[in-house]
Amino acid sequence: MTTTPPAPRLSPLPIDQIDDAVRETIAATMSPESAADPSRILPAMATMLHHHELYRMQADLSHTLYKGALPRRVMKLILLRTAWTNKGAFVWSFHSQDAKKQFGFTVEDLERITVGSGADGWDELDRASVSAVEELQATGTIGDVTWEVLARHLNPKQLIEIPVLVGQMHGVIYTQNALQLPLIPGSPGLAAR
């Protein structure tokens, strides 16, 4: 059964309202093709340009965390578990496929992420990474047992990035979901594996 996605709550910023400040944000946060031709900007991103200052700060933080200190697998596990538990279809669809292409995730890994930290097959660090997301969402902190496991594998800089990454992804997903931003055409959303 196919469900029709909800209609976006805001329209993309019209091209005739793209001024120099918006063009600067586009150049800093999107592809060179988008900067050269704003009509190529995905509708979801073009919608965020209504508040281009906030979008740029959000994009800058996302980029910093994506290229941050955390091991790539840990970063993707945290990002994907946060997306899954918050029904972040846009984030899940893109990053699940990126995790497979760039970081060797398997369909089984993605299924395990949907089940959570209680799933069979995790190693110690993977389970603790997924648990950290679940604990932050449930209690606003990471419990001592999970923290001890993480601290055995990660340095202080990496440990600091974990709650910031979860919080950042919540902000991105909440915004996308509340605005009902459209998925990339052809995107399978939460069905992506």
Image (cartoon, rainbow, N blue to C red):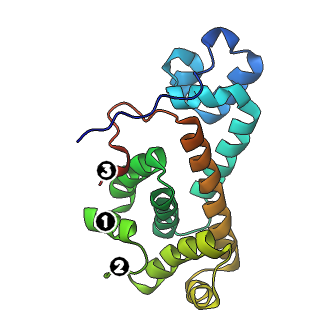
For marks 2 and 1 on the same chain, the one whose residue lies earlier in the sequence: 1
Disc 3: CA contacts within 10 A as few (<14), some (14-19) or many (>=20): few
- Is residue 37 among what the camera can see? no
From the viewer's perspective, is residue 54 above or below residue 121? Answer: above
With 136 as the anchor, is 100 left or right in this view?
left
Instruction: Name the residue that disc number 2 marks.
Output: 119
Which mark identifies residue 152? none
Label 3 or label 1, whichever comes before in sequence order: 1
Q: CA distance from mark 3 to mark 2?
A: 19 Å
Q: Amino acid at mark 1?
A: Glu
From this viewpoint, is residue 56 visible?
Answer: yes
The type of residue carrying mark 3 is Ala
The answer to which quarter of the image holds residue 178 is top right
Mark 1 lies on residue = 111
- Residue 191 - label: 3
Residue for point 52% across, 66% down: 78
